[in-house]
Image (cartoon, rainbow, N blue to C red):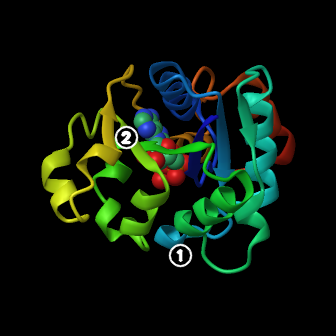
Amino acid sequence: MKLGIFGGTFDPVHMGHLVVAEETREQLGLDEVLFVPAGKPWFKSEMPVTDAEHRLAMVDLAIASNPAFYSSDLEMARPGPSYTVDTLELLHEKLGDSSQLFVVLGADALSELERWYQPQRILELANVVGVTRPSHRSVDLGELSKTLGNARDRLSLLEGPLIEVSGTEIRKRIHEGRSIRYLVPESVEGYILEHGLYR
Ligand code: ATP
């Protein structure tokens, strides 16, 4: 089985995330994409993040209509910072060598891979796939792999539709009383309104 692992804050999940996941699923022929909201994102430890339960509930609403998309509370259930490498170790142990793991991320996150916790171990356990973002239309994979023990064959960059939306932008718009229609699925917009998030 080819399994995509899509981690992130998802605060909230938005159309940019869904397009990245679907584009990767299609281009790489993934059987499933697992959305894994971070419990306490290590890279955002100074910033307040919405309760993980809300972020997971919104992910579940957003992916409900896609039979290849699943969510996992694996990182939320673990105390301390969420490290991708720990999630991969767990999945590898559970699924064994018959499954191929693909870490899915935006090109902005890919370009910072060397700063992640244990990036070389990540590349032993999985392929890492970046998807272009308007702010990051290219990444020098050759340069990146040099800093990561020459794992060039485990790194790739996919071009997908460029969608300039971020969690930050959504939160800002809600805070300013502006519309987020079409930037998040309708069900997620409803959830945000119902629970008074980001005001
Ligand atoms: P924030 O603005 O709160 O930092 P974000 O939407 O940029 O949020 P995350 O929710 O942490 O970030 O994103 C999870 C993953 O999805 C990251 O790998 C990020 O690069 C990627 N991603 C998010 N939005 C887009 C987008 N519009 N296009 C491509 N990749 C994206």
Q: Please tell me which residue is depicted at 86% across the width and 40% down the height of the picture.
A: 194
Ligand 1 within 8 Å of disc 2? The answer is yes
Query: Which of label 2 and label 1 is nearer to you?
Result: 2
Quadrant housing residue 49? bottom right
The residue that mark 2 highlights is: 130
The residue that mark 1 highlights is: 45
Q: Where in the figure is residue 123, as x and y percent of width and height?
A: 40, 58
Q: Is residue 57 visible?
A: yes
Residue 136 got which mark? none
**Is 37 located above or below residue 20 in the figure?**
below
Name the amino acid, label 2.
Gly
Does label 2 or label 1 sit earlier along the sequence?
1
Quadrant housing residue 64? top right
Tell which of 73 and 185 is nearer to you.
73
**Is 167 located above or below residue 76 in the figure?**
above
Q: Please tell me which residue is depicted at 75% across the width and 60% down the height of the picture.
A: 74
